[in-house]
Amino acid sequence: MKNKMTQIVVGIFFGFLMLIVGAQTRVFGQQSFNLVGVWQAVVTPRNCQTGDPSGPVFQGLFTFHEGGTMAEDSAGFPPPLRVSGHGIWAANNMFHPTFAYTFFRFNADGTLAGRNITRQNATFNVNGNEFTSNATVEVRAANGNLITTVCLTSTATRFQ
C-alpha cells in the first residue's frame, strides 16, 4: 500500500512538472517581439550588386505605432533637403517584420526634387530589443520617374 501511494505521489509530481515545463515552452514559443516603440538605427548605404558599403554611415530613427503605421527620420540628408518619412509596417512573421515608408526630397532652392520609397525586411535578435534590416530604396524624380535604386542595411536598438 505504501509503495502504491509513493507511485501515485511521484506520478502526480511528474504530471505537474510536465504541465509547468510545457506551459513555459509554449509561452517562449509564442513570444512575439513587439516592434511598437522608438528605435535608434545605424544605417549603411550599400552597393546593391556587391553588398559593399557605398557611402557614409548615418543615424536614423524609426517610430512604430500600434495599428501598423510608422514615422522615420534620418541624419542622412540635411533638414532643408528632406522631410520626415511616413509609412506602414506588418509583423506577419513575428521574428521578421517588414516596413515601408516614403519622404519628400527638396532642392537647395526649396523646390521639390522628388521622393524616396524605402522597403525593409527586419530580423529581431534573441531578446527583441535589436533588429537588423535590409532595405531597397527607390529614388524618384518629382514627376514620379525612377532615377535609381539604392540598398541599405541597418542595425536598430530599442530606445529606452
Image (tube, rainbow, N blue to C red):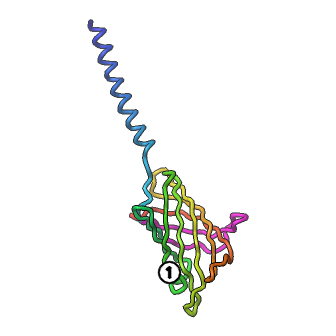
Identify whether 34 is placed above or below 47. above
| In front of the other: 56 or 8 | 8
Q: Is residue 39 left or right of residue 132?
A: left
Q: Residue at x 35, y 33 (%)?
A: 20
In this figure, which residue is indicated by the disc labeled 1?
A: 83
Task: Using the rendered view, name the quadrant where residue 27 is placed.
Answer: top left
Residue 92 on image: x %, y %: 50, 53
Query: At 45% from the left edge and 52% from the top edge, which residue is drawn?
Result: 127
Give x and y (percent) for residue 43.
56, 69
Provide the residue span drawn in magenta: 38-60
Q: Badge 1, how many Cα within 10 Å: few under 14, some, many 20+?
A: some
Q: Nearer the viewer, residue 48 or 115?
A: 115
Which quadrant does the N terminus fall into? Answer: top left
Q: Would you place residue 83 above or below residue 17 in this image? A: below
Instruction: Give residue 82's position: percent from left, percent from top.
Output: 53, 82
Check residue 140 for magenta coloring. Answer: no
Tag 1's secondary structure? Answer: loop
Q: Quadrant of the C terminus?
A: bottom left
Picture quadrant where residue 65 is located: bottom left
